[in-house]
Amino acid sequence: MRLFDVDVTQREGGGLTLSLSGELDLSTIEQLERAVAARVDGRPELVVLDLRKLVFLDSTGLRLVLRLHERLHRVGGRLVLVKGPRRVHRVFELTRAVDVLEILSDPAEISAGGAPPLAGGTPPDR
């Protein structure tokens, strides 16, 4: 198994899904940065980061997620995270990034054209 991998797919109805697997940290961040730069910058209104197969996330990965959220928000786009395993999600909780980001448990809950999340990021009860 590779240490980290990114699988990029077009979403039905528009946007992109980036499915992350393995460990996202200082040693693997460049791979995700390249995928984001090549496919995300200035294009889709909706970007989904699927974290369900991610086993580790450090502050470098968190910083990239937050920068991507800001970049998309500035141009009227939307970043949605599909919640990862407890160990990964805990990073978002400890840093209070859950208050800023839209995080869902099930990718089926994502609507392509839906309104951006309310202030505070994560919808209630998620």
Image (spheres, rainbow, N blue to C red):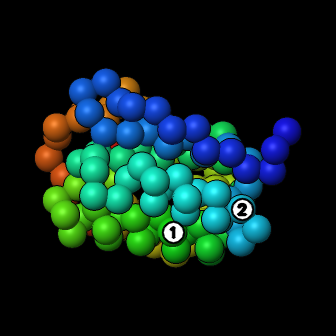
Label 2: element kind = loop
Answer whether labels 1 and 2 touch (C-beta < 8 Å): no
Give coordinates of residue 34: x percent, y percent.
55, 59
Quadrant showing the N terminus:
top right
Q: Is residue 40 visible?
A: yes
Give coordinates of residue 78: x percent, y percent.
27, 53
Mark 2 sits on what residue?
Answer: 28
Residue 23, picture quadrant:
bottom right
**Callout 2 amino acid:** Thr
Q: Residue at x 51, y 69 (%)?
A: 64
Q: Which residue is drawn at 64% across and 65% down?
A: 30
Mark 1 vs 2, N-terminal side: 2
**Left or right of residue 87, residue 123 in this image:** left
Q: Which residue is drawn at 71% across and 62% down?
A: 28
**Callout 1 amino acid:** Leu
Nearest the eye: 125 or 20: 20
Q: Is residue 123 visible?
A: no
Q: Residue at x 38, y 39 (%)?
A: 16
Residue 76, picture quadrant:
bottom left
**Left or right of residue 35, residue 76 in this image:** left
Residue 106, picture quadrant:
top left
Mark 1 sits on what residue?
Answer: 64
66 up-or-down from 79: above or below: below
Give coordinates of residue 45: x percent, y percent.
23, 48
Q: How crowded is mark 2: few (under 14 residues within 10 Å), some or many (20 or more)?
A: some
Give coordinates of residue 14: x percent, y percent.
26, 33
Q: How crowded is mark 1: few (under 14 residues within 10 Å), some or many (20 or more)?
A: some
Nearest the eye: 112 or 45: 45
